[in-house]
Amino acid sequence: MSSGSETTVDELHDSRSGPEKEGRTWSSTQTSISTTEGSELHAFIKMRNKVDKDTEEWEKLNYDIHTLRCAHKEVCTRWKKILLQLGEVTRRRQTPY
């Protein structure tokens, strides 16, 4: 905890506005979302690394890893598009008529 006169790093970050704050918000959201997906992907990679490369099991695990990565990329792209569209709606509402 900080005393009344000390400023923490988080307080400095919270005082930012505009793109810096939006970038930090997007980054923290991505981190919390991708933790679960990342652990599943990590488990598949660990399993694949334990299997001989020239086997059917390795190919199936590799395909699953590729599929997870593609799905994650698609979800991130969709969310980014949604958030960008929401930002445009917010900007339109803030502009005077």
Image (cartoon, grey):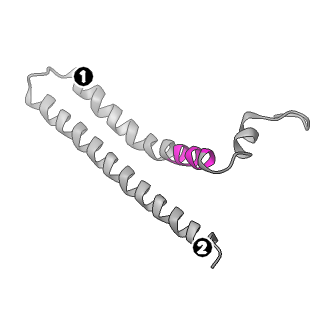
Point out the image quarter for the N terminus.
top right
Q: Is residue 73 magenta?
A: no
In percent of width and height, residue 80 lies at 43, 54
Who's the residue at 46% across and 47% down the image?
33
In percent of width and height, residue 39 lies at 39, 36
Residue 93: mark in rendering:
2
In percent of width and height, residue 48 lies at 22, 27
Return the disc, 1 or 2, that comes first in the chain's sequence: 1
> Disc 1 marks which residue?
49
Q: Is residue 24 magenta?
A: yes
Local packing at callout 1 (Cα closer than 10 Å; few below 14, some 14-19, many 20+) is: few
- Numbered disc 1: secondary structure: helix
Using the image, determine if residue 21 lies above or below residue 87.
Answer: above
Using the image, determine if residue 91 lies above or below residue 16.
Answer: below
Residue found at the far front of this picture: 97
**Callout 1 touching callout 2 (CB < 8 Å):** no
Mark 1: amino acid: Asn
In percent of width and height, residue 37 lies at 38, 43
Who's the residue at 42% across and 56% down the image?
79
Mark 2: amino acid: Arg
Residue 20: mark in rendering:
none
Using the image, determine if residue 3 lies above or below residue 67.
Answer: above
2 or 76, nearer to the observer? 76
- Numbered disc 2: secondary structure: helix
Q: Is residue 82 left or right of residue 87?
A: left
Who's the residue at 39% across and 38% down the image?
38
89 or 1, nearer to the observer? 89
Magenta stretch: helix, strand or loop mostly: helix
Magenta-tinted stretch:
20-29
Point out the image quarter for the C terminus.
bottom right
